[in-house]
């Protein structure tokens, strides 16, 4: 006696998946593994059945079927936004429509840095001793240049 379902193919009989139920389930944007768990089969079987029934991949069918719920959520969110529920709006926009709080920053590595400086008191000593001398002279009532005499 031959194994199989009588069509000449050997192996386990194909587990039936209701196409209408599959389409309704894909509206909520599940993963392939979640879909397989729901229908109690393997992810490969889900992919094969979608290809056989709809002629496309799992991700393409899921994207196509989830558009209705995305539009409904958008409409619902806009209705509640007008009523003042801003937290719900932010949650839905981030999770359903892929919005983000993080601004995209474009870095420019060809920046020009302009340096401006002025040189004061060119004759002053560059160390701390000159600062101490000037402070001492100011304390005595003399300016730094008036108290000096040339020999």
Image (cartoon, grey):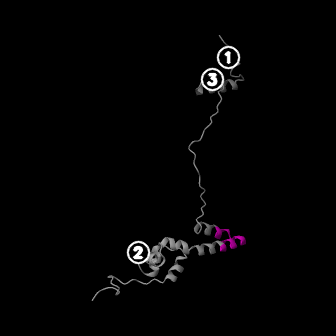
Location of residue 43 in the rendering, given as x and y in whole percent from the top left corner? 42, 75
Q: Which residue is mark 2?
A: 44
Which span is picked out in magenta?
Answer: 75-89
Crowding at mark 1 (Cα within 10 Å: few <14, some 14-19, many 20+): few
Above or below — where is 90 with respect to 138?
below
Q: Nearer the viewer, mark 1 or mark 2?
A: 2
Above or below — where is 12 with respect to 83?
below
- Residue at figure coordinates x 46%, y 73% from the top left: 32
Q: Which residue is mark 3?
A: 124
Q: Which residue is mark 1?
A: 148
Q: Is residue 69 left or right of residue 13?
A: right
The quadrant of the picture occupied by the N terminus is: bottom left
Label 3, secondary structure: give it: loop
* Mark 2 vs mark 3, CA separation in Å: 83 Å
Crowding at mark 3 (Cα within 10 Å: few <14, some 14-19, many 20+): few
Give the residue furthest to the bottom.
1
- Residue 138, picture quadrant: top right
Q: Is residue 51 magenta?
A: no
* Mark 1 vs mark 3, CA separation in Å: 13 Å
Q: Is residue 147 left or right of residue 101?
A: right
Label 2, secondary structure: give it: helix
- Residue 76, picture quadrant: bottom right
Mark nearer the N terminus (1 vs 2): 2
């Amino acid at each position: 006696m031959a194994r199989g379902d009588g069509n000449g193919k050997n192996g386990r009989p194909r587990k039936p998946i209701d196409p209408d139920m599959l389409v309704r389930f894909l509206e909520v944007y599940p993963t392939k593994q979640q879909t397989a768990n729901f229908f109690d089969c393997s992810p490969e079987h889900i992919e094969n059945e979608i290809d056989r029934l709809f002629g496309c991949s799992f991700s393409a069918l899921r994207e196509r079927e989830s558009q209705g719920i995305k539009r409904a959520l958008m409409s619902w969110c806009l209705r509640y936004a007008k009523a003042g529920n801003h937290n719900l709006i932010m949650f839905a926009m981030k999770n359903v429509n892929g919005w983000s709080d993080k601004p995209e920053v474009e870095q420019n590595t060809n920046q020009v840095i302009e340096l401006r400086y002025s040189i004061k008191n060119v004759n002053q000593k560059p160390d701390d001793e000159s600062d101490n001398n000037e402070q001492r002279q100011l304390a005595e009532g003399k300016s730094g240049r008036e108290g000096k005499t040339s020999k």
